Image: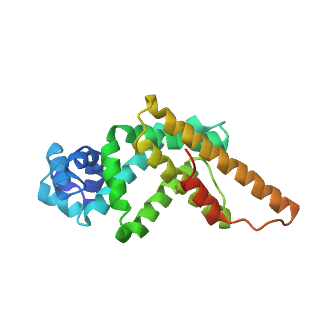
Amino acid sequence: MTEDLTLDELRATLAPLLPRHAAFDGWRPQAVDMAARERGIDPDIARLAFADGAMGMIDAWFAAIDTAMLNAVPAAMLDGLSVRRRILALVEARLDLLAPEREALRRALAVLAMPVNARRAAALGWRAADTMWRAAGDSATSFAHYSKRATLSAVYAATLLVFLDDESAGQADSRAFLARRIEGVMRFEKFKAGVRNAGGGERLSLSRFIGRLRYPAV
């Protein structure tokens, strides 16, 4: 019964419904009201679950995407695939889930781009990347743990910008863009390993590399 749900459970219940309303009403309380009515929940109670406003709504939706992605690409599907293919499969699953909600995503990214939301936006990008790497079986520690997530977060963010205006069949252009970025990451990781094995070489700059990933020529 919905009246017995905690606020966290309400957020999880309503989160998948929010984007269809946010696409028209924006990430505002009205979208919460509409989603609540769909589930037979008192809108006033639903608003309590999203007392932190647009960012709370977007956070809950992205968490729902994480869950749906893991359901769409279970561990059994990833067994036997290379790391590159695992990451590609996970990001592509996210694109499939986001495809019907591109206008809501556009509005969400506009909210995330506001300077006041920069820290939380970065945290959401990190969470998505961390979820994907863990699903891919990553067990890296120390600097490798952080560099992998920072790099994938940048790749994913760049892909979403292409995805927003992609009118190709099945988002083929976005998938091709993603494949090129992932291939670039794999080459860079091999290069880093070669430098480490050689015992020296030019100092690598992760920040410059991520900058090139985020703003490449399409």
Residue 21 drawn at (x, y percent): 22, 46
Q: Is residue 151 left or right of residue 73?
A: right
* Horizontal and vertical percent position of residue 104: 30, 47
**In screen coordinates, is 154 left or right of 94?**
right
Question: In the current view of this chain or complex, which residue is farthest to the top?
Answer: 169
Along the viewing direction, whichever of 216 and 69 lies nearer the viewer: 216
Closer-to-camera residue (155/47): 155
Colour logic: rainbow
Q: Is residue 51 left or right of residue 84?
A: left
Q: Of all residues shown, which one is farthest toward the front?
A: 217
Question: In the rendered picture of this protein, how many numbered marks are placed on residues?
Answer: 0
Residue displayed at 82% across by 56% down: 194
Quadrant of residue 5 within the rendered picture: bottom left
Residue visible at 37% across and 61% down? 112
Percent x, y of residue 79: 63, 37
Residue 115 visible at all:
yes
User: Please, which residue is most extreme toward the right here?
Assistant: 198
From the viewer's side, name the closer residue of 216 and 98: 216
Q: Name the quadrant of the C terminus.
A: top right
Q: Position of residue 206 (x, y in %)?
A: 65, 64
Horizontal placement of 75 versus 195: left or right?
left
In this view of the protein, which residue sits in the foreground, 107 or 67?
107
Task: Tell me if residue 121 comes above or below residue 32 in the rendering.
Answer: below
The residue under the point 23% across, 53% down is: 26
